[in-house]
Image: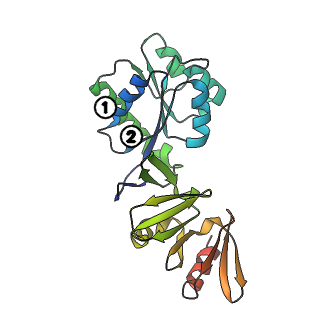
Amino acid sequence: MLRSRSGGSRTAPLITVLVADDEPAARRGVRQLLTPFHDFVVVGECRDGREVLAALDVLKPDVVFLDVQMPEIDGFEVIRRRTPARMPAVVFLTAYDQFAIRAFEAEAHDYLVKPVSEARFAATIKRLLKRLRSGDAAARDEAIVVTSARGATVLRLREIDWIEAADNYARLWSGGRSYLLRESLGELERRVGAHGFVRAHRQALVRVGGVRALRAEAGETIAVLACGTRVPVSRRRRAAFSAALRSL
């Protein structure tokens, strides 16, 4: 997957993580243990099972580190309500070892007993990488991570509607919200061009899969996006843009 942190970029598997534990110290512990593993990014934290169920729908993480005992809805009940087939890879976290058999009956990837040693955690990560980079990862799509004062946000490329130049930055538009990435539009085009993004004009890239219509208005060509945004297509780019639409 594609990722970018603080202006840097590289092509690498991006594995998104949700951390669920009612103890703040335990959540911090998972973050610290993940620090050496740069292919993993924490996209959210939850304090109880209700928050986990909501976050799974919104964040769609690849992995969830899930505490067994949480208020109201415990880890096993989270899986029962969502069903194992709709869960990401699950790594159970608990202070007790008596739930191990139930954990694997629930199709958990691993079962970690607190406190977790660095060596034991590394072994879990190694197996996760093998699993997620195998055929199980085929359905995972490309993404970009943007960072801000609020933390990291993962944007799946299929969720980005269009991208515009903003001086030395690129502004990524997704679902009516915008995110700044410290990267020029030209640099970003080289990274996402193979994933369905085409220049509409000198300062805009459009995900052609999100184009609802291409219209001629007052001598201009306008790309009407599914999100409602209207992006002009320059005369110079019109042929290539139309060809990209026809190839879908």
Residue 122: mark in rendering = 1
Q: Residue at x 48, y 55 (%)?
A: 142
Against 147, is 49 above or below?
Answer: above
Against 146, is 24 above or below?
Answer: above
Residue at image mark 2: 129
Q: Residue at x 36, y 45 (%)?
A: 39
Check the image and name the residue furthest to the top.
98
Residue 115, position in %: x, y?
34, 18
For badge 1, the amino acid type reads Ala
Against 137, is 177 above or below?
Answer: below
Q: Residues within 10 Å of mark 2 (few under 14, many from 20)?
A: some
Q: Residues within 10 Å of mark 1 (few under 14, many from 20)?
A: some
**Quadrant where the C terminus lies?**
bottom right
Q: Nearer the viewer, residue 38 or 51?
A: 51
- Element type at marker 2? helix
Disc 1 or 2, which lies upstream in sequence? Answer: 1
Residue 111: mark in rendering = none
Residue 33 sits in quarter: top left
Q: Nearer the viewer, residue 96 or 71?
A: 71
146 relative to 212 in the view: left or right? left
Q: CA distance from mark 1 to mark 2?
A: 10 Å
Residue 127, position in %: x, y?
38, 34
Q: Residue at x 60, y 69 (%)?
A: 208
* Figure disc tally: 2
Residue 233 sits in quarter: bottom right
Q: In this view of the protein, can residue 142 be seen by the observer?
A: yes
Residue 191, position in %: x, y?
42, 65
Q: Residue at x 51, y 53 (%)?
A: 155
14 relative to 104 in the view: left or right? left
Q: In this view of the protein, can residue 86 be seen by the observer?
A: no
For badge 2, the amino acid type reads Leu
